[in-house]
Amino acid sequence: MSNMDFQYDSLPIQLLIAGACYDANEGHMLVDRFRGCALNPVDCSGGDIYHHSDWLLLNDASRHDECSKQESIQLLKGSIGRCDSSSERYICTSHKSNCRSGLLFETKDEDCLVAYDTRTELVNFDLTHYGGCDYTSDAGTVGFCVWQATECPTKYTNVNADPFWAGQLPECTCERVLTGACVSQNNPSDFFCAVTPEVCDSSQDYMTGSELAESKEVTCRLCSDTMVSRPRPAGSMGQRSGGNDSGIAASLVTFTGLIVGVTVGVVLSLACITFCFCKRKKRMASNGVEQDAKMDDDEAPSETPELT
């Protein structure tokens, strides 16, 4: 998607509000059944049920407020997986269609958040990245970022989260992602943002992000362009930069310094051991010569004085 003009950037933006997972046992009070904010029904554990943001607004307003906060969206885990291969640069993304090989996609990676990759090992990126759709004509290339490949219109080409061309970096971060919407069948002007058709109930129709932009001249966005702070990974020796992908350089410096320090320490220890061993061996050899000389003196016959 390099050198591409992002479509629909001039249109008004409506931010996505997450739904939530609830315990399916209706014998408990609603406040006790809340499990957590979620973007998709598949994010809920077995036995739990998913309710979209409109349901929360009508039935659990306090949770609706909680799940509308950018902290709740950007730091949400359980919705994002990882293209789990060095050839994919271990990139965090939302769907297997954003990987070059969907077979290598690991769903629900605990280190992958909607906005950030919090993995503590050496990885290529600090941010979660998404796929895209682009279209090239004589006028140039246009496109937009999406949750998954099925959001791409006819004639558009799906673009992987990590293009992996020489010198090219991913461009689709969460604040650029266009989501679709669940649109009321009774009132087409009534809609809310959603990442997949599965979020909608039977009284709603799903519109892709581009369909929404073309028909209603508004875009649904996954995240705000005001990013919350990247969480510090538990047990990490340092925090990489949250606003860009430069943290890998700092990690490499730290790792390299550690390896050099350990290597120097091992070499010095071996040298010290070798020196002490040689010195001890030399001392033992010297003592042996002295003892041999002493024994020779003790064994030599003493001279008997002449009797006159």
Image: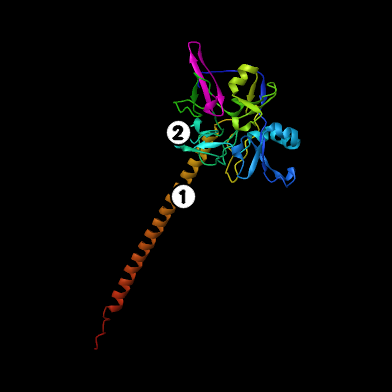
Please name the residue that numbered disc 1 is placed on: 265
Residue at horizontal 54%, vertical 29%?
148
- Vertical placement of 13 versus 236: above or below? above
Name the dominant secondary structure of the magenta segment: strand
Disc 2 residue crowd, few under 14, some 14–19, many 20+, Cα 10 Å: some
- Vertical placement of 269 versus 108: above or below? below
Verify whether residue 138 appears in magenta: yes
Is residue 104 in view? yes
Q: Which of the 4 image quadrants contains residue 66?
A: top right
- Vertical placement of 150 versus 214: above or below? below
Please name the residue that numbered disc 2 is placed on: 101
Farthest-out residue, top: 138
Magenta residues span 131-151
Farthest-out residue, bottom: 308
197 sits to left or right of 290: right
Q: Whole-percent x and y of residue 53? A: 69, 32
Tag 2: amino acid: Ser
Spatial CA distance of label 1 from label 2 is: 43 Å
Instruction: In this rendered view, identify the residue nearer to me: 261 or 300.
Output: 261
294 sits to left or right of 183: left
Q: Whole-percent x and y of residue 113? A: 59, 36
Is residue 69 in view? no
Instruction: In this rendered view, identify the residue nearer to me: 84 or 17.
Output: 17
Verify whether residue 263 appears in magenta: no
> In which quadrant will I find the C terminus?
bottom left
Disc 1 residue crowd, few under 14, some 14–19, many 20+, Cα 10 Å: few
Q: Whole-percent x and y of residue 152? A: 53, 23
Pointer 1 with pointer 2, Cβ within 8 A: no
In primary-sequence order, the first of circles 1 and 2 is: 2
Q: Which of the 4 image quadrants contains residue 76?
A: top right
